[in-house]
Image (spheres, rainbow, N blue to C red):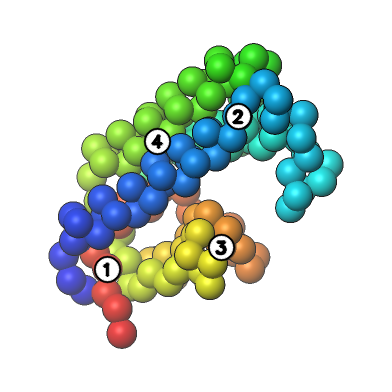
Amino acid sequence: MVPVDIAALEQYLGWIVRESAAFTATIRADTLERAVPSCPAWQVRDLAWHLGRVQEFWADDVTRAADAEPDFSGERTAGPDDAVALAAWLEARTAKLVANLRETPTATEVCDLTATPTGRGYWIIADDGMVYVYGDARNAGNAAATHARFTGIAHN
C-alpha cells in the first residue's frame, strides 16, 4: 500500500463537486419537468431530489462511528419544488458531503481504484474485500459496508 495521495483525494472530491455543479446548472424552472433520458419515469426534479438525498445520506453516514448502523429508514424529505431553492438545496448537500469526506479520518486501505469506461464513476476495492461504487459504476451484488475510511491507494 502507498500512503494517501492528497492530490488524488482532492481530484476525486473535485470530480464530485464538478459533476454535481454541472447537474445543478441544469435545474431551471423550464427544465424541472423534463424527462431524464436514462430514467424515463423520472423528471429532472426527481433526479435532483434523489441526488440530494443520496449525498445527504452519505454525508451523514461517513461521520457515523464505524460500529453504528446506517440509517436506511428512507425518512429523508424531498427537496424544494422551486428551481432556485432546489438548486441551492442540492448545492448545500454536495458541500456537506465533500466537507465530511475531507474531515473524516481514514482507516481502511484501498487496494485498487478503477474508473468506469465513461469516466463518470469508479469502483474502489478495499482491503476488507468490499467493492465500493460511485457515479455510474454498477454494483454487481455485494452490499458494500458503509463505514469504510480509506487510507491508501495501490495500483498495479
The dot on residue 153 is: 1
Q: Which comes sooner in the sequence, label 2 or label 1? A: 2
- Near mark 3 (Cα within 10 A), the count class, few <14, some 14-19 or many ≥20, is some
Mark 2 element type: loop
3D distance between C-alphas at marks 3 and 2: 24 Å
Q: Is residue 133 visible?
A: no
Note whether 9 is above or below 79 in the view shown: below
Q: Position of residue 103 (x, y in %)?
A: 24, 37
Observer-nearest of 15 and 76: 15
Tell me where residue 97 sits by quadrant.
top left
Please tell me which residue is depicted at 53% across the width and 72% down the height of the picture: 117
Q: Which residue is mark 4?
A: 97
The dot on residue 137 is: 3
Q: Which comes sooner in the sequence, label 3 or label 2? A: 2
From the viewer's perspective, tell me whether residue 140 is left or right of residue 99: right
3D distance between C-alphas at marks 3 and 4: 19 Å
Q: Which comes sooner in the sequence, label 3 or label 4? A: 4
Q: Nearer the viewer, mark 3 or mark 2?
A: 2
